[in-house]
Amino acid sequence: MIPVWAQVCYVVAAVCFILALKGLSSPKSARRGNLIGAVGALLAVVVTFIAYDIDNLGWILLAVAVGAVPGALGARRVAMTAMPQLVALFNGVGGGAAALVALLEVRHSELLSDGALLASAFTILIGAVSFSGSVITFLKLQELMTGRPITFPGGPFVFGGVLVASVGLGVWTVATGSMTLAIILALVGLLAGVLLVLPVGGADVPIVISLLNAFTGLAVAAGGYVLENALLLVAGTLVGASGTILTRAMARAMGRSVSSILFGAFKGGSSAGGGEVSDRPVRSAGPDDVAIMLAYARRVIVVPGYGLAVAQAQHTIRELVDLLEKRGVEVGYAIHPVAGRMPGHMNVLLAEANVPYEQLLEMDTANGQLRTADVALVVGANDVVNPAARTSPGSPIYGMPILDADHAGAIVFLKRSMRPGFAGIENELLFDAKTTLLFGDAKASLTALVTALKSL
């Protein structure tokens, strides 16, 4: 029986998780929300060690240390561009841990009710799917395997058969309480997770990470039911609900359904990634010409993207904007919901450079200002400003809401090369008569613009 004081502490920890989630809804409060959530997690762990009579405490503390050291080092050293991969790994570990705990519970099936056995089987399956699926998303984003959809003849039928088998094994496990069947169920879940993610193209992988995060939350919540732990129930439900909402929001921001993201490759509708370099002629200019264009503009809207994050050029773009503002130019940042490789990627990146929050414009506001902007300065973005989303029904990004950079008076595009974006298609905006390209690494190009502006 859990002591009353421990139950109160668990409630406090649960409230911390709720406040953390609320804090993460805004860049202004995100840091505070993250800290509140960390305090809640620490409280829950400490209370658990004190309130329970724990066997093998030394081994448990050793396992905690073995996990904490590489986890802390990885989180501190990871680059912003690799943050989605880290999130995928951490999420996968959570799902795998939930599945292992459920397996241990099935080992003592004679002590479990039918409801607890059902929850255990569910946790084993969903946790295994989350673990293996998260590993595949990590490999795709880390480019350790191709980012293109991987399909094979009869793929949908194989996946469907695996799902049917997993349901049958789950029912059989509940009926018999067999540990052997539970292990087989976990193995089938691992296969299901791999088959779920392989057909997803690179541009859609961050959405799948969010979906798998929701799976992990559901697995943890079900595990909380089995263990009769209210905190796990609350925490898992929060993660499951928020992950589901985020998945739907990201899919909507790309103008697609979750089903088309997961299974579109079988019908040729997935964002594939890759693509060939175009040899069509474009208009390019040097830093001096672009600097003059920016210096004499009335309003400039910066459109940041993944290339800005790769180049770690957030401080340089802030310096450029400061110089423009000193010349009386009105400047804002147009933030697309899925710019970069995760939601809020650009917000976090620009926050590192202390860009004022009021300059960060959500898509609807930004599109209104782009129509009256003299210059749209696109730095490392591509698919999120591609007019094909509006004009090309056969395009993999057709229907995706985009930033209307093409409505600005002039467009300056900072690009390393003519390679397509993550969706693997040409961007017609590059060939627009209003577009001027400045080729090179984003940080080097922005530094050259800063130098040129100072000399004017």
Image (spheres, rainbow, N blue to C red):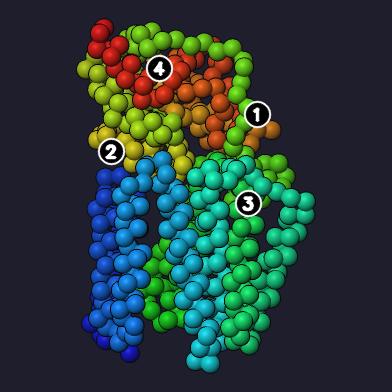
Q: Residue at x 25, y 81 (%)?
A: 50
Disc marking residue 352: 2
Spatial CA span between label 4 and label 1: 25 Å
Amino acid type, label 4: Val
Which is more N-terminal, label 4 or label 3?
Answer: 3
- Given this view, does label 3 or label 2 mark the residue nearer the observer? 3
Q: Secondary structure at mark 4?
A: strand
Quarter where residue 71 is shown? bottom left
Residue 309, position as x, y percentages in the image: 39, 35
Question: What crowding class fits label 2: few (fewer than 14 Cα within 10 Å), some (14-19), or many (20 or more)?
Answer: few
Spatial CA span between label 3 and label 2: 34 Å
Spatial CA span between label 1 and label 2: 37 Å
Above/below status of 300 relative to 211: above
Above/below status of 408 relative to 246: above
Amino acid type, label 2: Glu
**Residue indicated by mark 4:** 375
**Residue indicated by mark 1:** 392
Spatial CA span between label 3 and label 4: 40 Å
Q: Which residue is outermost to the bottom? A: 110
Residue 303, position as x, y percentages in the image: 41, 28
**Residue indicated by mark 3:** 198
Disc marking residue 248: none
Q: Residue at x 75, y 59 (%)?
A: 157
Q: Secondary structure at mark 3?
A: loop
Count of numbered circles on the image: 4
Q: Residue at x 71, y 41 (%)?
A: 268
Q: Nearer the viewer, residue 302 or 413?
A: 413
- Given this view, does label 4 or label 2 mark the residue nearer the observer? 2
